[in-house]
Amino acid sequence: MSDFTNVRFTLAVLDLASSTNYYTSVLGLTIDFTAPGWTFLSRGSFRVMLGECVDAMPPSKLGDHSWFAYVTVSDASILFAEYQTSGAEFTQALSDKPWDMREFGIRTIDGHRIMFGQEL
């Protein structure tokens, strides 16, 4: 059996420059490298590829299908405060859940939704 060694989400975005700016300035990711029509970013073990697709349906039109990741973090309270300061749009406020997670949700500039959670 072969183990998975990394995961990099691939997301279609309408405006690569604006989306790249959002992921770096609001979510605190670092640009790993770029290629024509693509930006590869990461923060810790979270990795994402943004691909410019100017004619694609925006994720904001996908309803519940716009969810793409649940990211487990070391301290959800600190990350929530960071994202409040940086101007993230929240879909769910920070709260403790009955499934022993402290979590919150955001919506990206393109309409993709991400949940962040910390094991309690």
Image (spheres, helix red, strand yellow):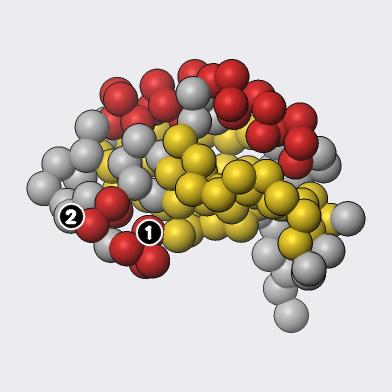
Which residue: 58% across, 26% down?
Answer: 84
Quarter of the image with the N terminus in it: bottom right
Q: Give residue 69's position: percent from left, percent from top.
A: 55, 56
Which residue: 84% across, 56% down?
Answer: 119
Which residue is at the front of the view, 45 or 81? 81
Q: Give me the C-alpha separation between circle 1 and circle 2.
A: 11 Å
User: Quick check: can you spot residue 67?
Assistant: yes
Quarter of the image with the C terminus in it: bottom right
Sequence order check: which comes first, mark 1 or mark 2? 2
Look at the picture and state if 81 lies above or below 99.
above
Q: Report which residue position mark 2 lands on.
A: 57
Q: Give residue 62's position: percent from left, percent from top.
A: 28, 62
Horizontal placement of 47 versus 77: left or right?
Answer: left
Which residue: 54% across, 30% down?
Answer: 27
Farthest residue in the bottom direction? 1
Q: Secondary structure at mark 2?
A: loop
Which residue: 71% across, 50% down?
Answer: 95
Q: Amino acid at mark 2?
A: Met
Q: Report which residue position mark 1 lands on.
A: 66
Farthest residue in the right direction? 120
